Amino acid sequence: MSTIVELFNFLRSNNKLWLYPIIITMLIIGGLLLVSETSVVAPFIYALF
């Protein structure tokens, strides 16, 4: 978790705010992939795509 906080602090200090939406989208997609491979929620997530 500290890596993510450090990344956001780096982006804020270097004024790379345009990268926030990209990183947040990648984290959401990664979370969906993690949830979909080992749970009962998988059929519902596959229906979205």
Image (spheres, rainbow, N blue to C red):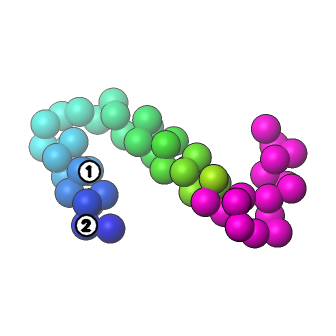
Label 1 packing within 10 angstroms: few (<14), some (14-19), many (20+): some
Residue 40 image label: none
Q: Residue at x 87, y 45 (%)?
A: 47
On the image, the x and y values in percent for residue 17 come to 29, 35
Residue 2 image label: 2
- Asked if labels 2 and 1 touch by Cβ distance under 8 angstroms, the answer is no
Quadrant location, the C terminus: top right
Magenta part of the chain: 34-49
User: Residue 1 sits in which quadrant?
Assistant: bottom left
Q: Residue furthest left?
A: 13
Q: Judge from the rendering whether residue 6 lies leftward or rightward of residue 30; answer left or right.
A: left
Q: Amino acid at mark 2?
A: Ser
Residue 8 image label: 1
Q: Is residue 37 magenta?
A: yes
Q: Secondary structure at mark 1?
A: helix
User: Residue 34 sits in which quadrant?
Assistant: bottom right
- Among numbered discs 1 and 2, the one appearing first in the sequence: 2
On the image, the x and y values in percent for residue 12 come to 20, 44
46 lies above or below 18: below
Q: Residue at x 37, y 40 (%)?
A: 20
On the image, the x and y values in percent for residue 48 come to 81, 43
Q: Nearer the viewer, residue 25 or 42?
A: 42
Q: Nearer the viewer, mark 1 or mark 2?
A: 2
44 lies above or below 47: below
Q: Secondary structure at mark 2?
A: helix
Q: Amino acid at mark 1?
A: Phe
Q: Judge from the rendering whether residue 26 lies leftward or rightward of residue 3; answer left or right.
A: right
